[in-house]
Image: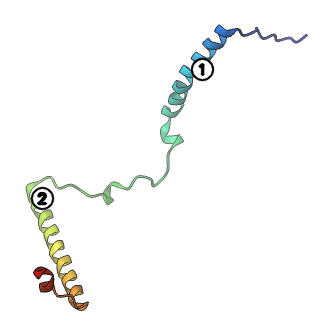
Amino acid sequence: MSMFRFPKMNRSNLEVFRFSFYLLTPIAVMFWVGIDTDKKFNVPGFWPAPETLNKIPKEPHEIQAELLRMKRADIAKRQRLEEKAKALGISLDDEEEK
């Protein structure tokens, strides 16, 4: 005869076991994931360095300077596209008439 004898599990004990398993498993997983996440899930270089991120202008003069920079970039892009269109033989006047 074995030294350890397991009691027979009837239906109510099985239901209690299933209920506690279903209840405690997600709690245990959340507990495991929530502790030392820096050590468990740390991927070096995943987040960009703060100095490489875009800075949102907050002061009025910074906002005006950013708007001016964007406007100049749009003008330069339009000039490049117009030169490319001329090189391909596309006339802008023909497009406006249609």
Of 77 and 63, the residue lying toward us? 77
Quadrant of the frame with the N terminus: top right
Rendering quarter of residue 15: top right
Residue drawn at x 15%, y 81% as measured from the top left: 95
Establish if 31 lies above or below 40.
Answer: above
Determine which residue is flagged by label 1: 21
Q: What amino acid is at disc 1? A: Phe
Residue 93: % across, % down: 11, 85
Determine which residue is flagged by label 2: 63
Residue 20: % across, % down: 58, 16
Check disc 1 and report its element: helix, strand or loop. helix
66 on left or right of 53: left
Residue 33: % across, % down: 51, 34
C-alpha span from label 1 to label 2: 57 Å
Q: What amino acid is at disc 2? A: Ile
Q: How is the image coloured?
A: rainbow
Q: Earlier in the sequence, mark 1 or mark 2?
A: 1
Q: Which one is in front in this view, the residue at disc 1 or the one at disc 2? A: 1
Residue drawn at x 20%, y 76% as measured from the top left: 77
Residue 5: % across, % down: 81, 10
Establish if 16 lies above or below 85.
Answer: above
Residue drawn at x 45%, y 55% as measured from the top left: 45
Q: Residues within 10 Å of mark 2 (few under 14, many from 20)?
A: few
Residue drawn at x 59%, y 20% as measured from the top left: 21
Of 91 and 18, the residue lying toward us? 91
Establish if 35 lies above or below 40.
Answer: above
- State if disc 2 and disc 1 touch (CB < 8 Å): no
Rendering quarter of residue 60: bottom left
Of 59 and 81, the residue lying toward us? 81
Query: Residue lying furthest front in this view?
Result: 98
